[in-house]
Image (cartoon, helix red, strand yellow):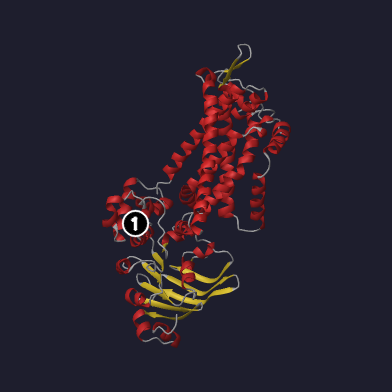
Amino acid sequence: MRRLKDDMLLCLIYLAAFAAEFLLIGILGYVFVKGFPQVSWHFLTSVTSVLQGTAGIAGNIVNTLYMVILTLLIAVPLGIGSAIYLNEYARPGKIVGLIAFTTETLSGIPSILFGLFGMVFFGSALGLGYSILTGAFTLALMVLPLITRNTQEALKTVPEAYRSGALSMGAGRWHMIRTILLPAAMPGILTGILLAVGRILGESAALLFTAGSGYFLPRSFGGWFRKLLESGGTLSVQLYLSMSKAQYSVAFGIAAVLLCMVLGINLLLRILAKKWDVV
Amino acid sequence: MTQGKVITKKLNIYYGSNHALKDVDISIRRNVVTALIGPSGCGKSTFLKTINRMNDLVDNVRIEGKVYLDGADIYGRGMDVTRLRKRVGMVFQQPNPFPMSIYDNIAYGPRIHERKSKAQLDEIVERSLRQAAIWEEVREGLYQSALRLSGGQKQRLCIARALAVEPEVLLMDEPTSALDPVSTLKVEELLCHLKKSYTIVVVTHNMQQAARVSDDTAFFLAGEVVEYDTTARLFSHPTDKRTRAYISGKFG
């Protein structure tokens, strides 16, 4: 009787595992099958032209790269910096508790609220308007908790003996952090960055009213810099817009490209993490 | 005893309300091995960590009295902690090599204190590893991770790492308690060699070890130094009856 129960339970567990796996593969497969026929060289390297009636996402790809890089440029130093402060400098107490609580709360806020705040604060109050920069600042706020939390967790796993070892040799605290702690915590930090990239790639609600939906490519060299202050829709935003206009074939094309990007970045960071984790 | 390398005057240490060291007056001779013995929690490690100011890092610590290194007050205004820790190296109970190559572990200290050429570093690495009697075992794999070494090798690596900055004093906090008997023996032999060039203070739980390796011994009990004398005298003719009871194994 007991045996039978065990076997049944095992069956259920396998079933659950297969269901989860199947769902993932199913979604990926469906998107790729529907999307890849849309993806052509032209689709990837041109911008949508209403006159010619063609669809292209080159502008959106560029916007997405801008958004990922800019957001990380803002959020990674801030996130790692605050994690180092919280973990290595601040004495545990009310203030640290409050900051930790705020960070937790920040990660639970719906993204459309970030969009609202970003539009009003960065867009209007700071006068950045609908621009990639406004979007990047907004997203930086969103991913900050991810990076801070993951860095903190990674720092916590570094043995205390490394700290006292380095300090006892006369290393200053910052030198110790730079040469011992950060390298040892690198895999965890990269995990945080990876999650942040996923969040940036997938975000649409917070960007719709901050970075807008521009899809043109810069025409001159200076244009690549001016672009920071111009509206630019990422792939996810364009995906949303295409769906709302019932252009499902374009939407699936974008989805396929987006998924490839996510997989690619995952792979890249995994390789990096492994390289850092040699010891 | 002539002018000691490390001298404490009325040293008192409190962790919050816990009075960890009480009026410790000690003069540690240069170029000998001084053993600190006593039961757990008696203040020997606290005393050790005072000499390189690692106690500063503990929350709620209060330090009163004076500690002199070659006559200079180490808690005085002119004392730079980085310089102090270069002069007073430390080896911990648990071997704690950094997660990097053997070479980088040894070069870590020298790199903190001044810019050195590759050739200079190479020389320091070899000299330190030789001094710690581990050179022959690792010379083929200097660029391999230090974490792959055995426990005893790790500890000798840590000793080499401490020696690389050419300290004057070497503090050792139960350096063999995590090691097997063979490795323990190697580290003990090492101490006898090293004392020619360094002043060594070693905390130990093991009285046989204190008797074997040290020239002087201080017996700590509940934060006080009960007895401090040459090892030979302290073990053969202890004057205090608590010392006699402890070294004959009646408690601790």
User: Where in the figure is residue A106, as x and y percent of width and height?
Assistant: 66, 45
User: Where in the figure is residue B145, as x and y percent of width and height?
Assistant: 36, 51
Give the amino acid type for the residue marked by disc 1 in the picture: Leu
User: Would you identify the image quadrant in which residue A127 lies?
Assistant: top right
For the residue pair B170 and B180, the one nearer the viewer reads as: B180
The answer to whether A124 is drawn above or below residue B149 in the figure is above
Residue at horizontal 39 percent and vertical 65 percent from the top = B170
Where disc 1 sits, the SS reads: loop
Q: Which residue is mark 1?
A: B149
Q: Residue furthest left?
A: B136
The answer to whether A141 is drawn above or below residue B193 in the figure is above
User: Where in the figure is residue B86, as x and y percent of width and height?
Assistant: 43, 59
User: Where in the figure is residue A192, as x and y percent of width and height?
Assistant: 54, 43
For the residue pair A5 and B65, the one nearer the viewer reads as: A5
Residue at horizontal 67 percent and vertical 34 percent from the top = A206
Residue at horizontal 63 percent and vertical 11 percent from the top = A51
Residue A130 shows in this picture = yes
Relative horizontal placement of residue B80, taking residue A143 as reference (left or right): left
For the residue pair A259 and B242, the one nearer the viewer reads as: A259
The answer to whether A34 is drawn above or below residue B182 in the figure is above
Residue B80 shows in this picture = no
Q: Residues within 10 Å of mark 1 (few under 14, many from 20)?
A: some
Relative horizontal placement of residue A55, taking residue B54 as reference (left or right): right
For the residue pair B151 and B131, the one nearer the viewer reads as: B151
Q: Quadrant of the N terminus of chain B?
A: bottom left
